[in-house]
Amino acid sequence: VFCVVLSAAEVRQKSQQPSQSKRMKSIASVAVLLLAVVPVLVDVTTALPSFGSKIPNGERVPCQDDTDEGCISGYCRGLGHPTCSGGISGQTPQLLSPFGQDWKDAEFEWTTDLCMADSDGDGYTNGEELGDPCCLWTMEQDAGGRVSSYTTDFVPSHPGDSTHVLPDDYERPKSCDAEEMRPGESPDDVATMAGGAGYNEGETRGSFDMVMEPYPIPRETTTYVDFLFNLPDDIGDVVHIVYGEALVSQPKHLHHFVVSGCTSRVDDDKVGRPTDDVPDDCNVPVGGFSGWAPGVTMWEAPRNAGVPIGKKFGIQAISVNVHYTDGDAPFLNGEQAIATDGIRVHYTPDLRPKTIVNSPLIQVGFGPPDMVVEPNKKRSFITRTCTVESRCQDQTDDTMNIIGSAILSNPDLTCASGAAMMLCSFSDLFQLACPASCGLCEEGTPRSPDEYDAFSVFYHAHLLGKEMYTTLIPQDDPGARIDLRSRDVWTYEDQTPYPLEGVVIRPGDKIQTTCVFDSTDRSESTRFDLATYDEMCLNTVGIIMDTPDMEGGDTTAANEIYLRGFRCSTGEEGDIWLGEFGLDEDPRLVIDSHPLKDAQCSFPTGLWIYDGVPSMQKRCDGEIVKTDDGICDQTPGPSFLNPTAVAGHTCQGGLFGDKDSNDGTTELQCTSGGGKWIEYDCGEAQQFLLQASVNGLALEEKQFILEYWWAPKCCVGLGADDKDVDGDGDGASSSTDSDDSSSASILSHGSALLLAGMLMMNLVAF
């Protein structure tokens, strides 16, 4: 979801957060984003910590110099460089060791030729130095815990440093057929993406491009913009995406793509052009990895699985949300960069037996005001316990009340009442929210599985993220802590899915996931939000399932795939909490060393049906805490902030400078008076309100603005007592103005809310 292509010097210079120019227009985009992508600095593509997982014992080579910054827990993290610190983000110059050059020449794959080579000329092959003298190791073995006992027990030496050699008593194995040299057997029907995405022999192949028309990137630090594309007419009714690749024209500015499917085709004159009006039906998750950032293979999946698109899957067009960064960079000299970025989709009409989907564990793309990374902390963390449960169950009455209030003006809506109104018969989205009431969750169906097969884990944060951890705690063995490819060295430049093999997750199991941040270079708190210099914590597990019948049944194919996945409980045990680790603490044990019960306060999850998303509330001592600070904190009944809803427009400069659409000022007045008419969202309004004293607002002024300007637009679930205000100066009240009211804004994206797209997409995501 998120990469910034800057030099290390530029990154260091930008330790202060810039003002955020524009957020995503819908929670659906945020959701997808939530799962979305990884970045790599183009200057340092050969200095990625994940490379260590792609060679035998690549993360277990002892350091010769314990003072080297790249020496983590005694192991060298820069085998491709003259020093271990070469593998750590931000270190320059990025020189290659002899092994690093050979590794690059091998296109970053552990090949037989690379294994048999002696890169550093010390008399030992690379395979011998890394514990794979017979060149039998594969990433699949490593992902499935099937590496030979010889390789596992071996103490490796550095294949790129001729002074770091094997001990004098080292002896080459007498036979490669010996028991200790043999890897474990691969279980039947187990998929892994360790081998990389691609076609199988004999598969029918096809591809198509989606490329934007030339687009001048705005002179702003952060820009989000949407583009629409129709699927080609000749691809057939349903195909499996095999993989995708980005067509990048502006590597210094392109941060990420987030992809959603549209159920209807779009007008030809809108194809490839920027739009502020994404159709309401562009809310279908596109499979697997529905996002991109530099270094990522889109929709990467095992060779027996794919991502379905096409008419029979309910996708006829594609919406691409694009994040550009540093459009105001000094090196542009005031000029605008022109982008012609896009995506090439590789597909096969030969449907594969398996389909992939993503299950989010934590999705903090934005958070309440008190959820921040405090400054000058070496190892601050945010964490959550996911208690696994089936997605095939109804939303709670409280959740449906809020959805009903926001979308149908019916605050009494429940799954039972909606089913009685026959919503199951004509609303696929209602089926998604209330599958049990719609008769879709009978025992023994694939929608209520006894277990889920995991094939990958993915981590995402921004610049401060340095470590990532996920552990499985089985219900039948609660004392176990099974590591799921945790990363004690992680960088936002190297966000890649890590393969799993043979990992089975069952309802009732717990999955603990944690992001660790280093804010020692920050002098102010860093909030969780969408801008590059804000923070995020978006961790997901990819699961694989049988491809459903695309001919239809009692629900859509897209619903079928979603309902076969798992979600995390949103009860109090599913709250998010924060803390700080000591330098020697193991974050894999956070549930033991820093348990939720010891946290002074925590943050509930469950933003409607979005899994792992903060609800914008805070819980202290078991009670939801209400304050007078936020826009929605004084509203009656259950309500919460929709940070992406439009709160209004302000006039910057000119005769009407600092006037606002909410006070009746119009765009025509502003621009005619020499001002600039600027849209702002509810998240930005909230930040302004929280700094009321700094902005010179008197208490009475703050109260008036809160009650009459922003609460009716920004607070979801206010019900029938919402105020009627003219928010954009067009003479229409916010309760009826579909462009500006919070409820109408949510209505326009209501399908995305009920879709869980954020979940699946995710990138099945990133």
Image: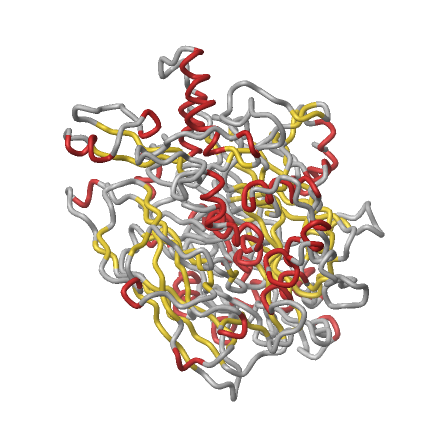
The image quarter in which residue 552 lies: bottom right
Colour basis = secondary structure
The image quarter in which residue 205 lies: bottom left
Image vertical order of residue 348 relative to residue 379, above or below: below
**Camera sees residue 167:** no
Picture residue at 46% right of the left edge, 26% below the top = 525
Q: Nearer the viewer, residue 377 or 531?
A: 531
**Camera sees residue 348:** yes
Q: Nearer the viewer, residue 146 or 128?
A: 146
- Location of residue 634 in the rendering, given as x and y in whole percent from the top left corner: 56, 22
Q: Is residue 170 left or right of residue 238?
A: right
Image vertical order of residue 720 relative to residue 504, above or below: above
Picture residue at 44% right of the left edge, 28% below the top = 710
- Location of residue 671 in the rendering, given as x and y in whole percent from the top left corner: 18, 34
Q: Is residue 740 left or right of residue 481?
A: left
Q: How many marks?
A: 0
In the image, farthest residue toward the right: 476
Q: Nearer the viewer, residue 71 or 169?
A: 71
- Location of residue 753 in the rendering, given as x and y in whole percent from the top left corner: 55, 50
- Location of residue 375 in the rendering, given as x and y in whole percent from the top left corner: 48, 26
Image vertical order of residue 759 relative to residue 127, above or below: above
